[in-house]
């Protein structure tokens, strides 16, 4: 037989939890001073060497103080020119404020060796998220003889007009050294400039590249 009585609910009184003696006895968190740059590498001195091409030796002599001053005084990195080995040598110091300064200075000197002006290359010291990308014309299309010469002419334009237009539209700097092309800028801007240069190498007329460049830069401006 089934009983018609309703089930009785059991109520449990909550018991307040007491703080454990173990958690109360924990010591306070230690506070350590941030490590300095030379302490991160266990006090070891770090070096970088940048080779000087023969055609950049004379320009380097002319602007040596413009390279030396920001590297030594602002980035706190020792720099010297090794005349025998034809290399620029960089070395970290005990008072170097940031461990990444040595690599930034190395990129700055390397950008000058590739053909960028000091006033443009120095942006690598001032700003993060700047890169140098290099490629050759033969990576895009295999060209020989007069076809190669015409492709280089299309990249520069009359009096460098095409190159300057791409630089100003994409906020990059471009160096065309024979068949090698170097682009300095942010990741997104380098991609836009590289696409425009590749179109010119493949034979697109400059007018078509300009119109496409205007559309892409307008989209980038809306995004950012």
Image (cartoon, grey):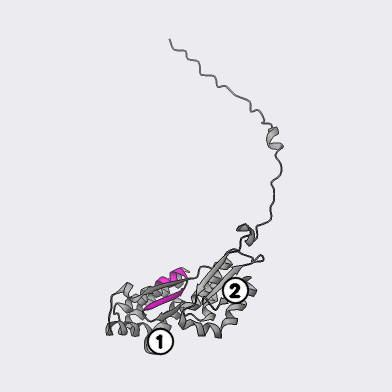
Along the line of sight, which residue is nearer the eye, 160 or 49? 49
Q: Quadrant of the N terminus?
A: top left
Residue sitting at x 29%, y 77%:
202
Query: Would residue 75 be seen by someone viewing this image from the given angle?
Result: no
Along the line of sight, which residue is nearer the eye, 212 or 193? 193
Expressed as whole percent of the image width and height from the top left, the position of residue 69 reads 62, 78
Quarter of image, res 139:
bottom left
Residue 83 drawn above or below residue 102: below
Query: Would residue 43 be seen by someone viewing this image from the given angle?
Result: yes
Expressed as whole percent of the image width and height from the top left, the position of residue 42 reads 62, 57
Residue sitting at x 56%, y 66%:
47
Q: Disc 2 designates what residue? A: 79
Helix, strand or loop at label 2? It is strand
Expressed as whole percent of the image width and height from the top left, the position of residue 196 reads 36, 76
Residue placed furthest toward the top: 1
Q: Disc 1 designates what residue? A: 160
Expressed as whole percent of the image width and height from the top left, the position of residue 135 reads 38, 73
Q: Which residues are magenta?
A: 179-191
In the shown orientation, is residue 4 left or right of residue 21? left
Q: Nearer the viewer, mark 1 or mark 2?
A: 2
């Amino acid at each position: 037989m089934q009983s018609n009585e309703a089930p009785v609910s059991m109520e449990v009184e909550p018991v307040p939890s007491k703080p454990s003696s173990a958690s109360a006895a924990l010591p306070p968190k230690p506070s350590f001073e941030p490590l300095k740059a030379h302490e991160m590498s266990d006090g070891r001195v770090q070096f970088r060497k940048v080779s000087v091409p023969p055609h950049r030796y004379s320009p380097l002599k002319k602007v040596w103080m413009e390279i030396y001053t920001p590297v030594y005084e602002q980035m706190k990195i020792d720099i010297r020119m090794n005349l025998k080995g034809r290399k620029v040598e960089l070395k970290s110091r005990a008072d170097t404020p940031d461990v990444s300064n040595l690599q930034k200075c190395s990129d700055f000197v390397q950008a000058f060796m590739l053909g960028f002006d000091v006033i443009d290359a120095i942006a690598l010291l001032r700003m993060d998220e700047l890169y140098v990308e290099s490629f050759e014309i033969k990576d895009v299309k295999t060209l020989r003889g007069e076809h190669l010469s015409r492709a280089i002419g299309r990249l520069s334009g009359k009096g460098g007009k095409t190159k300057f237009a791409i630089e100003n539209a994409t906020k990059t700097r471009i160096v065309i050294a024979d068949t090698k092309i170097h682009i300095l800028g942010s990741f997104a801007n380098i991609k836009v400039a590289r696409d425009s240069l590749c179109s010119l190498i493949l034979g697109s007329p400059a007018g078509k590249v300009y119109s496409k460049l205007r559309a892409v830069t307008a989209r980038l401006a809306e995004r950012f």
